[in-house]
Image (spheres, rainbow, N blue to C red):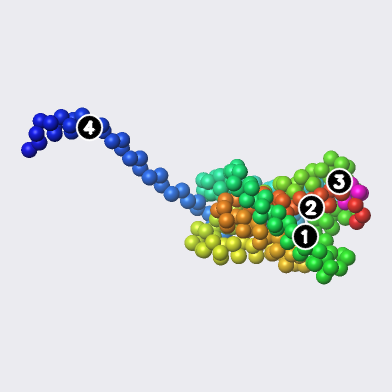
């Protein structure tokens, strides 16, 4: 039996706040098919534009370079909205200084290795070695405004869209299958290199993709790999800008 003092103490004791229920784990509902669908959009739009425009220059060239990549990236974002929780939660695509600095650091290291690998690849392939984008711009002198659009696309926009596909949709689909992070990293790196559909550059693209994938694996979020990819693309984008303006010999 409680004494009066014990009863009073119990009555005057502050009520502890109820503990909130743990939030349910939010998971996405897309698989490998989503990645292949987005990749098919890229290929289909690229082939359609190439057939319709032939050997383009000016605005048509910009359209061929920009539209397939942007549409594929937009499809990736739409899939996360319809079958998941949006790119911020599913990809970790949000602004964090820690991710930005990690991306800059890893991207800087990757830029060095990529530059060395590109020089070796060019020496191995000979004077005709160039990427698909370079071959499209080769011999075409663009107005400054269009040249800047291509520069910004290759430097900033294309890396974002490609990361949404490879280190976003594909990475997330493999995580959903409970694959280890190492396996996800290795396979996404290989698919990135093969998915550019440039057989002669596949080995070079593997070297390019490694630091980008490391940034994604280290942080667990897409922002770092986007930044690392953009750092890697800066010098090629600048070279194409100078080439398309006629300031750099073809």
Which percent across, then down, holds residue 169? 59, 54
Say which quadrant the C terminus sits in: bottom right
Q: Which residues are magenta?
A: 243-247
Q: Residue at x 56, y 44 (%)?
A: 88
- Of the numbered discs 2 and 3, the one sitting upstream in the chain is 3
Check contact, mark 4 vs mark 2: CB within 8 A: no
Residue 69 visible to the viewer: no
Q: Secondary structure at mark 4?
A: loop
State how many labels appear: 4
SS under mark 1: helix
In front of the other: label 3 or label 1? 1
Residue at which label 1 appears: 115
Q: How far apart are labels 1 and 4 at the CA level? A: 69 Å
Q: Which residue is mark 2?
A: 235
Residue drawn where x is 52% and y is 48% of the image: 84
- Does the magenta segment cover residue 32? no
**SS at badge 3:** loop
Q: Which residue is mark 3?
A: 58
Q: CA distance from mark 4 to mark 2?
A: 68 Å
Q: Using residue 86 as the reference point, say whether residue 237 is left or right of it.
A: right
Element assignment for label 2: helix
Residue 13: give its label: 4
Query: CB under 8 Å between callouts 1 and 4?
Result: no
Looking at the rendering, which quadrant does residue 206 occupy? bottom right
**Which residue is more in the foreground, 88 or 108?**
108
Residue nearest the viewer, comparing 135 with 1: 1
Q: Earlier in the sequence, mark 3 or mark 4?
A: 4
Q: Nearer the viewer, mark 1 or mark 4?
A: 4
In three-dimensional space, the C-alpha distance between marks 1 and 2, rounded to whole angstroms, equals 9 Å
């Amino acid at each position: 039996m409680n004494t009066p003092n014990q009863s009073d103490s119990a009555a005057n004791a502050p009520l502890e706040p109820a503990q909130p229920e743990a939030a349910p784990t939010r998971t996405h509902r897309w698989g490998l098919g989503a990645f292949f669908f987005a990749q098919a959009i890229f290929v289909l739009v690229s082939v359609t534009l190439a057939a319709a425009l032939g050997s383009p220059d000016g605005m048509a060239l910009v359209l061929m370079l920009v539209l397939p990549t942007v549409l594929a990236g937009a499809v990736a974002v739409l899939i996360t909205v319809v079958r998941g929780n949006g790119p911020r939660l599913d990809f970790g695509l949000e602004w964090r200084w820690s991710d930005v600095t990690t991306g800059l650091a890893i991207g800087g290291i990757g830029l060095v290795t990529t530059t060395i690998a590109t020089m070796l690849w060019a020496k191995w392939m000979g004077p005709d070695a160039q990427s698909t984008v370079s071959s499209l711009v080769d011999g075409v002198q663009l107005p400054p405004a269009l040249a800047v659009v291509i520069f910004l696309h290759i430097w900033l926009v294309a890396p974002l869209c490609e990361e949404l596909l490879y280190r976003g949709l594909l990475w997330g689909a493999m995580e959903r299958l409970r694959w280890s992070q190492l396996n996800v990293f290795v396979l996404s790196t290989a698919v990135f290199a093969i998915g550019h559909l440039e057989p002669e550059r596949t080995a070079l693209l593997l070297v390019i993709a490694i630091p980008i994938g490391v940034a994604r694996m280290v942080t667990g979020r897409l922002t770092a790999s986007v930044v690392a990819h953009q750092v890697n693309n800066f010098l090629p984008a600048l070279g194409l800008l100078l080439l398309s303006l006629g300031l750099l010999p073809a």
